[in-house]
Amino acid sequence: MKVKSFAVFCGSKSGMDHLFEDHATQLGKMMAENNISLVYGGGNKGLMGAVANAVMGSGGKVVGIIPEILIGWEAGHENITELIVVKDMHIRKKMMYELCDAAVILPGGNGTLDEMFEMLTWNTLNIHDKKIVLLNSNGFYTHLIAHIETMFHQGFLYENWQERLIVCKSPEEIISCLV
């Protein structure tokens, strides 16, 4: 199956390392170049804004899904292909999962981890079989990866986590493993 859309989960802040925003921008440009639409949280700040602006700036399609409560907080992006305002976070995540062919996790905070682990859980339960890619920009997720490995070795996961979560170090690697 050809991947036509990525759900990108990432921070509404940019973080301290400039590489995070560079990677978000590079990924957005490469998505547009490969005719891959962006489905994301609808914000215009941080890494969310960087990836959306890069897709739009390169002639791609962007669908943002934002809950009413976050319109001000994440600065709902008005200059994208489509901005869908929903009632709550649960509806947002469900719509994002339904509209994407694969998920990409960039650096972010609690919300990003929530989205990643929900995707992984749903994948494990066979609710979906979409590929999930974690971008470990400059080692941002190295400790999390080690913890997931510990969960596996301590018998808390039903299978090897590497069958469900692909770890990449660059946007180019993401494109090459999903396209």
Image: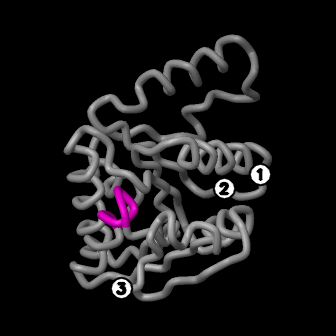
Identified at 50% across, 76% down, the residue is: 64
Relative horizontal placement of residue 29, taking residue 95 as reference (left or right): left
Nearest-to-viewer mark from 1 and 3: 3
**Residue 126, label in figure:** 1
Q: Secondary structure at mark 1?
A: loop
Which portion, as a residue range, is magenta? 45-51
Q: Which residue is mark 2?
A: 129
> Foreground: 72 or 39?
72
Label located before the other in sequence (3 or 2)? 3
Residue type, numbered disc 2 = Asp
Q: CA distance from mark 2 to mark 1?
A: 6 Å
Classify 55 as above or below 157.
Answer: below
**Residue 117, label in figure:** none
Residue type, numbered disc 1 = Asn
Residue type, numbered disc 3 = Asn
Relative horizontal placement of residue 135, taking residue 73 as reference (left or right): left
For the stretch drawn in magenta, what is the main secondary structure?
Answer: helix
Q: Position of residue 102 (x, y in %)?
A: 52, 61
Relative horizontal placement of residue 117, taking residue 90 as reference (left or right): left
Circle 2/circle 1 CB separation < 8 Å: yes
> Foreground: 85 or 64?
85
Instruction: Give residue 167's quadrant in the image.
Output: top left
Asked whether residue 3 appears in the rendered view, the answer is: no
Q: Which residue is mark 3?
A: 79
